[in-house]
Structures are given as C-alpha cells and as structure tokens.
Amino acid sequence: MLKKLTRSSLLVACAAAVTMLVPAQSALAATELTVYTAVEAEDLARYAETFNQDHPDIEIKWVRDSTGIVTAKLLAEKNNPQADVIWGLAATSLLLMKSEGMLEPYKPKGVEKLDKKFVDKGAVPTWVGMDAWVASVCYNTVEAAKHGLEPPKTWRDLLKPMYKGHLIMPNPNSSGTGFLDVSSWLQMFGKKSGGWEFMDRLHKNIARYTHSGSKPCKLAAAGEIPIGISFAFRGAKSKAQGAPLEIIVPAEGVGWDMEATAIVAGTSKLEAARTLVDWSITRKANEMYNTGYAVVAMPGVAKPVEHFPPNLLEKMIDNDFEWAANNRKAILAEWLKRYDSKSEAK
Amino acid sequence: MNQASPIELPAAPLADAPLIKPKTSKDDRIMVGFILMISLYLLITLAFPLYAMLSKSFSTFSFDLTNFEFQVNSGDGWSAAVSADSLNRELGKYTADDLATSSDGRLGVTDFFPDFSFRSPTLYRIRQIQLDSSFLFGSERVADTEWHEYGSNDFRRVVIRPSSSTGLANYRSYFSTPALFRSIENSLLIAAISTIITVSLAFGFAYALNRSTMRFKGIFRLIAMIPILVPSLLPGIALVYLFGNQGMIRGLLFGESIYGPIGIVMGSVFFTFPHALIIITTALGISDARLYEAAIALRASRWKTFWTVTIPSARYGLISAAFVVFNLVITDFGLPKVIGGQYNMLAVDIYKQVIGQQNFEMGAVVSVVLLIPALFAFSIDRFVQKKQVASVSARSVPYEPKPHRQFDWICLGYCSAVAIFIVGLIAVCQYAALIKFWPYNLSLGLSNYNFEVMDGGGWDSYWNSIQLAFYTAIVGTLVVFTGSYMVEKINGFATTRSAFQFLAMMPMAIPGMVLGLAYIFFFNDPANPLNSIYATMGILVICTVTHFYTVSHLTAVTALKQMDREFEAVAASLKQPFHRLFSRVTVPVCLPSILDISIYLFVNAMTTVSAVIFLYSPDTTLASVAVLNMDDAGDVAPAAAMGMMIFYTNVIARLLHLFITRKVVRTTQAWRKL
C-alpha cells in the first residue's frame, strides 16, 4: 500500500513538474546566449540588465576573462566553438578571428548611425565597435615632484634624460594596451624606422615592462613609479579612488583600440545573436557604455566622464587596425629582438 | 588485464628441480585489475597529455610559396602565371628560416615585386593552387582556388597565410631568438644561486635544531613550515612592499632594484626553505652518535668533527635537498611573474607565449626545454635518495646534543634571524592587505577584501579553491593509497608493478606549467572523448592530483612498508579476501599517513598556481590564480589579502589535521605503545 502510494505520488509530482515546465518554456521561449567578453567584471550585470529591459526573452550567459585569455580561449576552441556572441572584446582580437573565418558577417540595423571608425570595413561588417579604449600617460604628481620632474606634454618629451628610470609601460607581447602603444608610435612616427628610433630612445628611460596594460597606471597611482603609460579609463578610475594622478594625453596623438561585438560563425542561435548585436549599437546601449568610457561608437551620445581628459576624442589617431593586425606578428618579433633580450643580466 | 599471468620466476631455477608455479589467487587478479586501472588513470592524466604537448611542439607553420601564383598586367595584357616561390628564388628575398612562422603569421606579397608602387596603374592577380592555406585581402579571408584581381593600391593589402606541417622549425626559431633562449641561462643561474643559499640556510637551521639544546625549538619548527602554506608568489608581493620604490626598507638594497634577480632569489629562498629543511633535518637526525664518541676519543676538534663526521653523514640529504630546491625554483612560475621585472625565466616564457601571443606551439617548445633540467634534477635526486636509505644501519645510536652555552646562544640567534625573515614577510603581507591605499592613505580597513570589484573572480574563487582542495584531498588520497597498496602488497606481476612505479614517480619531474599546458592540448581536442571535462572542476582536480602524485605515493608506500607482509599471509590462510584485510587492518594502521597525504594534497591544492593557470574557467576561478591576476592587474593589496586568506585557510586545515590525527592516534594506534 505504502509502495503504491509513493509511486502514485511520484507520478503526480512528475506530471506537475512537466506541466510547470511546458508553459514556462513556451511563454518566454527564453534563449540562452553564451557571450564571451572582456568587459570589466563590475559592469557585466548592468549590461545584461539593461539589455533584458528590452529583450527579456534572451538570457545572457557571460564568460568573462582578460582580453588575452578570452582571445586564447576563442582561438583554442576554433574547431569547436562554444560562444554564440562576442560582446566587448578588443577589435584587434576580433580581426584575428575574422581572418580565421570564425565570425559571421552581419549588418546590424542602424549601423549607419555609428562613427565609421567603429565599423568593420568589409562589405557586410563582421564586427561593430562599442567604445574606445584610449592610451594615456598616468602621471603621479606627488612622486614626480619628489624627483623634480616636469609633466610631459608630448610623447617625445618622455625621451628626456630626466625621466630615466621613472617610466613604465606594458609589454606589447603580453598586453593589448602595450601593442596599441607600439602600433600607434609606428603609425605616427614612421613605420619603417621613425617609430623604432623613438622606441629605442624611450627604452633607455623605461624602468621595466609589465605584463598587463592596467598595471602601469596602478603602479603610478600607488607611487611605485611616477609615470605609467597605460590607458585613460584606468587612470580615471584610480584618480576617482583618490590617487594623486594627472592623466596626460600626449599632443602628437594617442593610439586606441575599441571594444567590439561580433557573432561567432556556426552559432545555432543566429536569430537571438542578431537581436543582441542589433541592440548593442542602439542609442541606449551607447549611453550605457558611456558610464565608463568617454568615447563611444555613436557620435553625439557621449557625455564627459569624470576625471577623463576632455580632449581625448580629437587626439585619437586614425588607427589602421588592418595594418596593425596584419603586421602584428612582425612588429612583436622586432620588439622582442630589440628590447626583451636586453634583460639587464648582471 | 590479459597480462595477468605469472611470469616472474628466477631465470635459472635449481638444476633439475621441478618448476613450481605459484598460483595466482582471485585476490591477486583483482589487485592487478586495480593497478591497471590506476595505471590507466596515470596514462590518461600524464603520459597522453605529455605526448600531445610534445607533438604540438613539432607542429609548425610556414608560408608555402609554391602554393601561390601571380599574374601581372601593366597595361599590355596579363603575364604568364608565376609562383611566389620562383619569384622568391629570383630575388633571394626569404630563406627557409624566414618563411617559418607561427599559426598567426602573415606575409605581404608586394615584396615579391621590387618595382611595386601603390600609385601605378598596374593590375595584379593572385590565386592559390591547392586549398591547404589561404590569403587575406585586408582582414577578409580568401580560401578558394580562383584568380582574384586587385589594383595596385589594393594589392598591398594582400597578405598570405601559412600552412601547417611538422618538423623542427619551432625549435630552430626558439634557439635563434636570443630573447627566448637567454631564459635558459637565467633560469639555471637563479635556480643555482637560490639552491646554494637555501641549502646553506636550511642546513644551519637544521643543525641548530638537531645539535643544540637551545630553547623554543618547537616554535622554530612551526615557523619554518609557514612558507609551505602560502602560494610561492606571496613572498614576491611582500618583497615589493619592503623593497619596492615605495618600500618600507628599500634603503637596504642600496639603489638596486628588487624587480629582477634579487627579488626572485629572495622569494625563492623563502618558499623553498621548508622543503630543504625537512630533508636535511631527516638526514641529520639519522646520524650515528657512536661516530661522535669516536671523534671525541680521538681528540678531534669540533671543526674537524664537523667536516669529517657531520657533513659526510648528511651528504646525501644535502644533495637531495639541493636538487629538490633547484627543481622547485626552476619550475616556479608565480614568483618570477610577480617580481621578475625584465628578467625572463622559462616558466614565465611559457605563459607569455600562450596567453600573451596565443602561440601554443612555441609554448610547447619552451615547455620541452624546461622539462630537461627538471628531469635531470629529479633523476639525480632519486638516485641519491636510494643511496641514503642504504646508509642507515640497525646498530646506529641516535645523537643526543649536550648543552653548550655559547653554541646554544649562537643557534638561538641564528634561528631567530631566519624566523624573523619568514614571519616578517608574512606579517608585511597582512599589513599590506589591511592598508587602504599604500602609501598615501595608511589607515586600516577591509576595503581590499572586496574582491568582487577586481579581476580574478571575486570571493567565488576563494570558495572554488576550498572545493578544489577538498576534492583533491579526497579523490587523491583514495587513488594514491589504493594504488600504493596494490603495488606494495600484490604477489608477483613484477613488470606491471615496476611500470606502475615508474608512472607514479613521473609527476614529480613534470613542472606544473608543462602539465597544465599539456592538458589543454590533450583535453581541449574536440576529438577526445574526455573533452567534456575541459573547463570543469573535474579537470582541475585531476590535474592537481596528478601534479602532487609522487610525494603522496611515496608517503603511502613508506607507511605500507612498515606493515609486515605476514598480515597478508595470515589473512590468506584464514581465507579472508584482501579487501577485508585492507579495510579492517591496513587502513586503520596507516590512518595517520593517510591523513598526512590528504592534508598535503589539500594545502598544495590551495596554493598551486602553475598547474592550473591554463585550466581554470570563468566558473572555476581559483584563489591562488586570483592572487596572480589581481597582482597582474596592479591590485597588489587585494592580491596580498587573498594570499593571506589562503594562508589562514591552510593554517586552520593544518590545525584540524593535527586535532584529528591526535584522536586517531589515540583510538587506532594504541597498540604501537605496547
């Protein structure tokens, strides 16, 4: 008797479970998108929430890590992709994937409203930009004063002997920020020789190269070293935390990369992926990016962000991403040859 | 399991004696089954991944110029198709070595046309002959065999992509890049210097503990073990706070930079000290008091006795300690990453190649290079340890130190200095973790413990680490102890056993970085049926168990060797199956050692970085990796805070272990006191 009872109650429970599941699925038809990203951890929840205000039927499953690791992960999964969409990864990385044929070309609705700089130049774009990530110099006024330094105004100022040992920058071989610095110097000062001559002289002043791009600015903020070549976003954050920093935008112009969005080729959820990409370039999305980034893809949206240098947009160079991507390997090899082997062996 | 046949008999039995084949019992066959299962485990988690890595290091990419053809039209019609290879031969532009590249290589095509000008009206055509490579127009991938036509201004945007093959090209390019191969020299040098310093310091410490009657020996023993409880990169963080440009006592470096060899050596000494101390203490502990009595009788001076008795009797311990330390330093990744500055070391190079440049092939090459010194140090250590066992004789009398006022004071002073170094570094970390914003806001608070807003995975990574440590301790102890029991207590099957012994010893020689990278190649292959464990907690547990397999295995074997084989004989004669003996007798008797193995695995799973750095996924971030990533992002104080969380967790685990062991000893080991 007892056995029978338990069996029938089990049946009822099963039936209940099924009836509860079915309407839930059909009413919402929630599609789950696996989204790879390198956006700062603290921003992710807000991004998903804002998106879900307009599209409650698409659920985002974030997979987040630093740019280098996400890129390595995507490339490692090339033959067996796990991601549906990439939302918030450096355009340089996306170009790498594009040339491997890993991205699905798609022209999102309203793409013509974006600044052309922020859209892939292909006939049907494979990626669209969100916001820019601009190189800057973080200058610790307290420590600099102790060493009697003057604030540099240009990149070339940094070559002055007084900065010797007081400069730090990311290693382009491990940091995307490091690479955008190097590629911008090559583009500004001469790809064949001018850029390298500049770096040869800069190298003499550099105390050491860090692995990550945000570390130079954080080290400058902590006074470990007076001047860190990093990016503006990081500097503004440290400044907000109370670090005695000045964020300097060198007069010659600054390199930049953008966070961008793309659909992974072969995704089984193309419809939902397109919806997300369409949304990611709307005005609302751009306003959302603007809370952290001073430069966003849609012109006229950006309001000044606290502690950001005001003239950032004008100083952004006309970055040739295609050139940078196609010459990346050669540039890094040359850099390694010139500067990494000189590890001061004593 | 077909091998389960009795094959090992003396090659030449007594002449004419009838050949007696011992029967294999059902128990024996079951045990062989177990051994084969655990061997299979080690093959899958160790041998196959290493093989995958080795083959990756031979997987090369080069530009196959014979596969691309051009046609040119300078206004007078299309020229005949000419291959890039023949153009290159004419121009003598690239050698075979120049054409070797990585998976991400690109080669511009305009260099094949010396009179190329992007302003000229000339038209160009390019096509591939076979489908095994591709070229890019801008970033657009072209992978067909059609002709594609471009104006000269567009033609400069065409780059060709490499095709893959196998060969030694990766090794050639490694050894022709000074920035890379110089790391070998750096790594060897740092490891050698650290070894000399650590072994000398540890010898002094062990000598004081064994040969003096100073006070506080127990406390010194405890303090000396602290470094085992923290990730190797934590001393690096402490050193930055002490000797960095804003350091508390940076003046002591006289202007030298802590970022580089000095920092790596200081940190290495810190984290390898307990490992050396354990080995040397054991070596000094077994020395024979009769030799010292003889020395006194012969009126040898203390100095002479030291060099003719103490050092020779401890020599195997010293050598073994030296190679263990050498191995630890050369394979360590966390410390040089944190404080190495521009000083390149092999283990960090692997990381830079894989994470920085996504050049997996070169990562595999550096791994193979790193394997060589590690394997070498390991084999010498094994060789020496075997000798040491033989040197202890049953008639030895343990040495009892006698009070000697002056000597005891010197020992106390020396040990205090070392203890201050160890405790000091840990205290600095804790202090750093509590300061709000070094050096501008020295007020204390817990803001650095707000891990949610930093890289590294937040508090989740801490809980993940604890999970990993638990699983590793449980699964690891189970696998290791069962394996060692089978191999120790089985009858016959010598080949199977020695093959298993060899597999069980291997993990110690494999650097964590190398193991982790090998796992990517093996488990991330979609063709691998075990692919589904990739990016789960499972792969982290397996990797950690395998990484720390050897020491656990040796502990278990030592414990089991203490148990007479008569137990098995008695059990067999009473017709008891081996599993009953195992659960009723063997496990209870060996319980203290089993607990030792689990705490060893727990602590190491909490602190390991190198083995898991390539394997964690966004859902399984770990505390030790978070320390590294937060430091990498410049959040040094939170990194110290997380490091200290690991330390306290390990302290608690150790205390628990001590408590449980005491209880267990009381309930299961009372017979020992009889």
Image (cartoon, coloured by chain):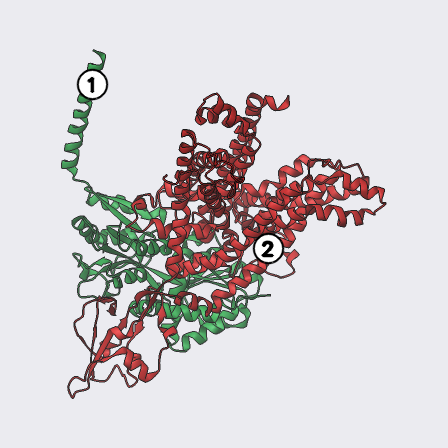
Q: Which color was chain A given?
A: green
Identify the chain of the residue marked 1, using the numbered disc in the image.
Answer: A
Residue B92: percent from left, percent from top: 35, 82
Q: Nearer the viewer, residue B241 or A235?
A: B241
Whether callout 2 and callout 1 share a subunit is answered no
Cα gap from disc 2 to disc 1, whole angstroms: 68 Å
Residue B141 is drawn in which quadrant? bottom left
Q: Which residue is mark 1?
A: A7
Q: Is any atom of residue B308 visible in this view? A: yes
Label 2, secondary structure: give it.
Answer: helix
Q: Nearer the viewer, residue A92 or B435?
A: A92
Q: Residues within 10 Å of mark 1 (few under 14, many from 20)?
A: few
Q: Which residue is mark 2?
A: B265
| Residue drawn at x 41%, y 35% as measured from the top left | B34
Label 1, secondary structure: give it.
Answer: helix
B471 w.r.t. A255: above or below: above
Residue B103: percent from left, percent from top: 33, 64
Chain with red colouring:
B
